């Protein structure tokens, strides 16, 4: 009886928390297992990457941006023609349509020029009597043809617009990356120094940021770009424009990093590091800056479209990249005249990659901003 009396209460004791419920096979979690049970073992970076992948728009537009940069870096391969090649016989050719037949495969019709009696300019129409098959991986180019093949038309000097857009992407896209890289360095360093040391250092840096923010962005860009020596080569102007864009745009990042550092410098781990006689450089690089990395990445991603639009605006106004170097802003400079837009609307095609890239960066930045807080719902 004593043994039965001792065993009886044990039957009413609720089961304690043990290992996760396993399925019939013993190696898969059962239906009652917690799907978030393993998140505590993941690092902060893994948590951010996990949440970013769950976003639909972020990874999709990220892949699209990667494709843009691959095409821009491989411009000599993807461009059907040399972007500087002048063909006076093919001025203002409208976009040609690519066709298909079982006999020729992919091909384009030849061009037939006719004189317009009103404008006295040559107008081009497809000539079915001339068939030019499309060739792949010929003469070091991905796609070309034995005859004229202008899929997006030509400009006033007969240069292929598609080739110029691809080569122009090398300048416009890399200006955004280099400009953000420079502003990231300035903003991170000065923002951390301002928030950590405080006092007159903080006051001086904040007044400098307010001074730069007081000027309108585009007039300030124009003034600094106009100050570049006219005798500079295209590559010097390229780096000059990049430095100008970065010098103006670092203030916003510096203020946000300063706020993060102000909140983190009073944490217990920072106070413990000070009590252990750790140096300022050690505390900043090991304790304060790592806590700002995710925020810096998000802000930098959101700043790249502004850099690209800044270069496009300066080049559109004739104060940015100079020929023979080309960019999307240089290509859009020809659309300033209304008569050109009315007669040759295909010259607006360079605006399409600008819009797509800016929208893609904004979507990726939004997804990264949401993923930077992986513990929220």
Image: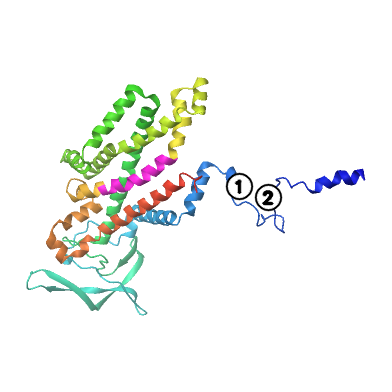
Mark 2–mark 1 distance (CA, rounded to whole Å) = 11 Å
Q: Position of residue 331 (x, y in %)?
A: 21, 55
Can I make out residue 82 in this image?
no
Q: Is residue 83 positioned above or below 306 on the image?
A: below
Disc sitting over residue 20 in the figure: 2
**Residue under circle 1?**
38
Disc sitting over residue 293 in the figure: none
Residue 256, picture quadrant: top left
Asked whether 135 or 324 is in front, the reply is 324
Q: Position of residue 220 (x, y in %)?
A: 20, 39
Question: Which SS class for mark 2?
Answer: loop
Q: Main secondary structure of the magenta part?
A: helix
Number of numbered markers: 2
Asked whether 270 or 110 is in front, the reply is 270
Q: Are marks 2 and 1 in contact (CB under 8 Å)?
A: no
Judge whether residue 303 is colored magenta. yes
Judge whether residue 181 is colored magenta. no
Magenta region: which residues? 294-309
Residue found at x 52% / y 46%? 47
Question: Which SS class for mark 1?
Answer: loop
Residue found at x 45% / y 31%? 264
Q: Position of residue 153 (x, y in %)?
A: 23, 65
Can I make out residue 336 in this image?
yes
Residue found at x 31% / y 26%? 203
Q: Is residue 27 positioned above or below 118 on the image?
A: above
**In the drawing, does residue 296 fall left or right of residue 311?**
right
**In the drawing, does residue 360 fall left or right of residue 8?**
left
Residue found at x 17% / y 72%? 124
User: For the N terminus, which image quadrant?
Assistant: top right
């Amino acid at each position: 009886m004593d043994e039965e009396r001792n065993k009886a209460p044990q039957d009413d004791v609720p089961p304690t928390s043990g290992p996760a419920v396993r399925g019939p096979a013993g190696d898969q979690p059962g239906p009652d297992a917690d799907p978030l049970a393993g998140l505590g073992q993941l690092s902060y970076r893994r948590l951010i990457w996990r949440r970013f992948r769950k976003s639909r728009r972020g990874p999709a537009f990220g892949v699209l941006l990667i494709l843009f940069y691959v095409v821009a870096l491989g411009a000599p391969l993807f461009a059907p023609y040399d972007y500087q090649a002048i063909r006076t016989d093919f001025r203002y050719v409208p976009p040609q349509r690519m066709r298909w037949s079982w006999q020729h495969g992919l091909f384009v019709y030849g061009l037939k020029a006719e004189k317009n009696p009103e404008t006295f300019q040559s107008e081009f129409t497809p000539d079915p009597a001339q068939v030019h098959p499309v060739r792949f991986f010929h003469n070091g180019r991905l796609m070309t043809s034995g005859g004229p093949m202008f899929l997006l038309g030509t400009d006033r000097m007969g240069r292929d617009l598609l080739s110029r857009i691809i080569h122009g992407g090398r300048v416009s896209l890399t200006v955004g990356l280099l400009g953000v890289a420079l502003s990231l360095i300035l903003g991170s360093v000065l923002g951390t120094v301002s928030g950590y040391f405080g006092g007159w250092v903080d006051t001086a840096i904040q007044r400098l940021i307010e001074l730069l923010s007081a000027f309108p962005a585009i007039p300030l860009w124009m003034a600094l770009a106009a100050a570049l020596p006219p005798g500079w080569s295209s590559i010097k102007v390229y780096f000059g424009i990049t430095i100008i864009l970065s010098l103006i745009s670092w203030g916003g990042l510096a203020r946000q990093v300063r706020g993060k550092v102000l909140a983190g410098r009073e944490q217990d781990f920072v106070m413990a590091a000070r009590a252990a006689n750790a140096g300022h450089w050690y505390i900043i690089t090991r304790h304060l800056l790592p806590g700002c990395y995710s925020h810096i990445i998000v802000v930098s991603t959101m700043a790249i479209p502004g850099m690209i639009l800044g270069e496009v605006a300066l080049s559109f106004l004739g104060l940015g990249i100079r020929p023979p170097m080309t960019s999307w802003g240089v290509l859009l400079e020809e659309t300033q005249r209304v008569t050109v837009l009315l007669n040759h609307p295909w010259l607006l095609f360079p605006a399409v990659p600008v819009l797509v890239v800016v929208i893609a960066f904004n979507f990726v930045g939004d997804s990264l901003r949401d993923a930077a807080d992986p513990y929220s719902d």
